Amino acid sequence: MLEHSTIAAIATPPGQGGIAVVRLSGPESYTVAARVFRPMDSRKRVADAKGYTALYGQFADGAGGEELFDDGIALFFRAPHSYTGEDAVELSCHGGDAVARRLLEACFAAGAAPAGPGEYTRRALLNGKLSLTQAEAVMDLIAAGGRQGAALANAARGGALARKIAAQQQALTSLQAHLAAWVDFPEEDVPALEAGPLRASLAEVKGALDELIGNYNAAAVLREGVDCAIVGRPNAGKSTLLNLLAGFDRAIVTPIAGTTRDVVEQAVQLGDIRLNLFDTAGLRETDDPVEAEGVRRSWAKLAEAGLVLAVFDGSRPLTKEDFALAQRCAECRAIALVNKEDLPLQFDAEVIAPYFSMVIPVCCKEEGARKLVAAAVARLLGTGRIDPHAASLSGQRQLSAALRARDGVAGALEALSAGFGLDAVSVCVDDALAALYDLTGENASDAVIDEVFEKFCVGK
Ligand SMILES: Nc1nc2c(ncn2[C@@H]2O[C@H](COP(=O)(O)OP(=O)(O)OP(=O)(O)O)[C@@H](O)[C@H]2O)c(=O)[nH]1
Ligand SMILES: [Mg+2]
């Protein structure tokens, strides 16, 4: 009966701010609001407030206590014209933890129950206001740090992905109807599907799913950012690079090889991409146990990172450590930066080139290098080819459903080519359709929905 309760939560983040908002949703929202909110204009009554109207008033403790502890605005929504589809009231008080918490407690005393994580959005889903992919996009939008990631999430929230998937479902459903009629009623005069058009329709659906899957990683980078390890020999200029990208002196830079010992972490927004940078200890053989531990951590960071910036000292000849690093980078998404371009070149970049998708000469002491590195990172991660307003998949749940759907369609195409008969094709199309219904949430079990909303914040 959870959906019939009236819930309350603080919808704004903790801390000091201009206002804080306490959100009520459920059938008793107006009753609860009437207990904690007194309109300044005594002729007005909360119970009579129409949807999409606001009243100015004072807040009182909800259990009949009459101390008026703040004043603010109540904003009213009438079912079904609210975010959740239920009666809802948003109470805006002054933005400070003490006031907001007291108002929330007043709502509890007046009969509201505490909202769970994402419970407002969950109710919107149950009331048909949103699809599951749109609900997931709400969370992505809230979490987005960069503009492009936010645009992608907003497109999904507006239904771009839902529409794209619906089009594939429609195409497969109409194929399936025809196939089923043909398989189930062979004696009837159902005209057999021509292999050519059938193959073309399946290939079109597969193409659409392949495109979504192919863009998954780049879209994820835009949404979530990427962990990026800065690695290289001592003195190559790794910490100088970190400071350049961070825009301030985050790490110690000295001419002494072995300056950085520990991993130094700093998140930066590089163009459209949020990079979680990890500056590391210079890679070399050493008897110093402290430095050796630093070097061990450098290799570990390299292995974990989604992107590696390998820094080489262009003013020194290539060493066996440089070569070992280059070989190791062949297994990663890595860019080679040949640093100290301002000094005479001693380094043979040709030797390391085969191990990297890009080798870029830079001078990390100069501001211009920031742009060069940003462009190279965007090119390697493929974020430039993502249209931020188009449909995209977000999260493992969506990706694995899309992969299953694509495999189903690919299986149908193979069955067709191998001449397995239309019933085999039909089974594969069924699998693909089931996966698409999982993706949109039309089939989703409570367990799946619970998992999606676990990640939400309280108050959304
Ligand atoms: N000329 C020149 N010097 C640079 C450049 N980048 C860094 N340096 C210098 O190289 C030295 C080492 O720089 P760091 O950034 O500390 O090098 P690192 O790779 O972090 O070194 P460790 O922490 O010891 O592994 C410093 O004296 C920097 O000023 C560059 O582009 N040109
Ligand atoms: Mg350093």
Image (spheres, rainbow, N blue to C red):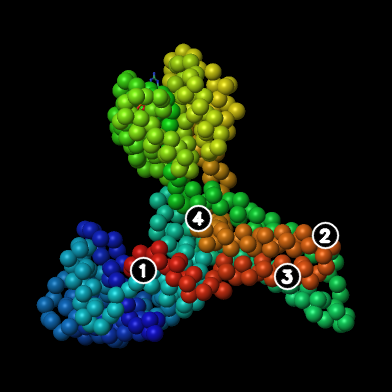
Q: In this view, does 236 lie to the left or right of 89?
A: right
- Closer to the chain start, of discs 4 and 1, is 1
Give the number of the mark in front: 1 or 3.
3
- Rounded to the nearest whole Å, what is the CA distance between mark 1 and mark 3? 39 Å
At 18% from the left edge and 71% from the top edge, which residue is drawn? Answer: 102
Does 24 sit above or below residue 200?
below
Residue 231 position in % (x across, y down): 43, 32
Amino acid type of disc 3? Val
Amino acid type of disc 4? Leu
Amino acid type of disc 1? Pro
Residue 460 position in % (x across, y down): 37, 67
Quadrant of residue 258 within the rendered picture: top left
- Closer to the chain start, of discs 4 and 2, is 4
Q: Which residue is label 4 attached to?
A: 152
- Closer to the chain start, of discs 4 and 3, is 4
Amino acid type of disc 2? Ala
Q: Which residue is label 1 attached to?
A: 117
Residue 141 position in % (x across, y down): 43, 59
Q: Are marks 4 and 3 in contact (CB under 8 Å)?
A: no
Q: Do the residues labelled 4 and 1 touch (CB within 8 Å)?
A: no
Does 244 sit above or below residue 417?
above
Q: In this view, does 393 lie to the left or right of 309?
A: right
Q: Tag 3, which secondary structure?
A: helix
Disc sitting over residue 427 in the figure: 3
Q: Which residue is label 2 attached to?
A: 418
- Quadrant of the image where one finds ligand 1: top left
- Rounded to the nearest whole Å, what is the CA distance between mark 4 and mark 3? 34 Å
Other-residue count near label 4 (Cα within 10 Å), few / some / many at <14 / 14–19 / ≥20: many
Quadrant of residue 74 within the rendered picture: bottom left
Q: Is residue 229 left or right of residue 329?
A: left
